[in-house]
Amino acid sequence: MRLEGKVAIVTGGGHGIGAEYARAFAQEGAKVVVADVDEVAAKQVAERLAREGYQALGLRVDVADFASASRMVERTVEAFGRVDVLMNNAAIFATIPISREPFDRISEDEWDRVMAVNVKGVWQCCRAVAPAMCRQGGGSIINISSSTVFKASGRIHYVASKAAVVGFTRVLAAELGGDNIRVNAIAPGSTLSEADPTPEIVRMREAAIAGRALKRLQRPGDLLGTAVFLASDDSAFVTGQTLVVDGGGVMY
């Protein structure tokens, strides 16, 4: 119960790893807001948690839109009185797929769409939540990056967006430290998070095993301990950091 009495928002919480983050926070005692552009999925996750005895709210949120992100925070405070944790998990990559093309064949529209969600969306949600955290005396923001940032491999627009998250995390941590708001990032490795993975996806995830110190698939559960640590008071003096969780694929 390391998050007892806390309120956590998980963006992109309607699918995959996001839904697992929401469950982990609820199991540790937090009241959870499941935010996703897919309203049906967000409400389904929240309803499942509620049936299991947890307090949860599902909301449709477009993270790239400041008005939508602000409503998310307002609804959270209305429902639960405060917001202690923001996990910026929403991203275009798995649930909303992108092309695997060389840099000069990516369309401008797709590049802009990835940046709008993966970078601008993090900024908009932080802008929306910071005033509430300042008023209550602090909070924890957790941004999701990727271990591909440190390996120079993968889809260039995705990797560029996740590299931006690392820099954003460091600067925001410096700016918000005086308000007792901690800002950290998690950089997961290739994770088998798809609900119904195709054989091609499984092969892609298995290909990452060879480059890891720990020779197995990475699954969503491998990320939950780090997420809870950063959300809880166990990390009360940790800010501006990026924790790579990829089984030793990157020694960072």
Image: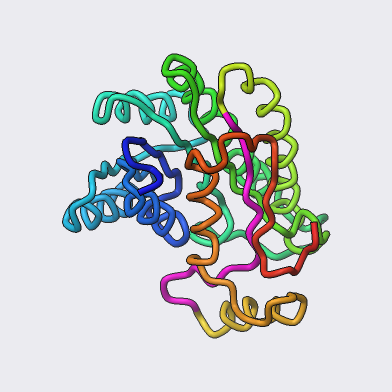
Q: Which residues are magenta?
A: 182-197
Q: x%, y% of residue 85?
A: 45, 36
Q: From what the image shows, is residue 169 above or below residue 91?
A: above
Residue at horizontal 74 percent and vertical 46 percent from the top: 163
Along the viewing direction, whichever of 176 and 69 lies nearer the viewer: 176
Q: From what the image shows, is residue 36 above or below residue 226?
A: above
Q: Quadrant of residue 67?
A: top left
Residue at horizontal 51 percent and vertical 57 percent from the top: 225
Q: x%, y% of residue 28?
A: 36, 50
Q: x%, y% of residue 198?
A: 50, 80
Along the viewing direction, whichever of 223 and 235 lies nearer the viewer: 235
Which quadrant is home to the C terminus?
Answer: bottom right
Q: Quadrant of residue 199?
A: bottom right
Q: Would residue 38 be found to the left or right of residue 64 on screen?
A: left
Residue at horizontal 81 percent and vertical 61 percent from the top: 151
Q: Would residue 27 be found to the left or right of residue 206 on screen?
A: left
Q: x%, y% of residue 148?
A: 74, 59
Q: From what the image shows, is residue 163 above or below residue 18?
A: above
Q: From what the image shows, is residue 70 above or below residue 51?
A: above
Is residue 157 shown to the viewer in this render?
A: yes
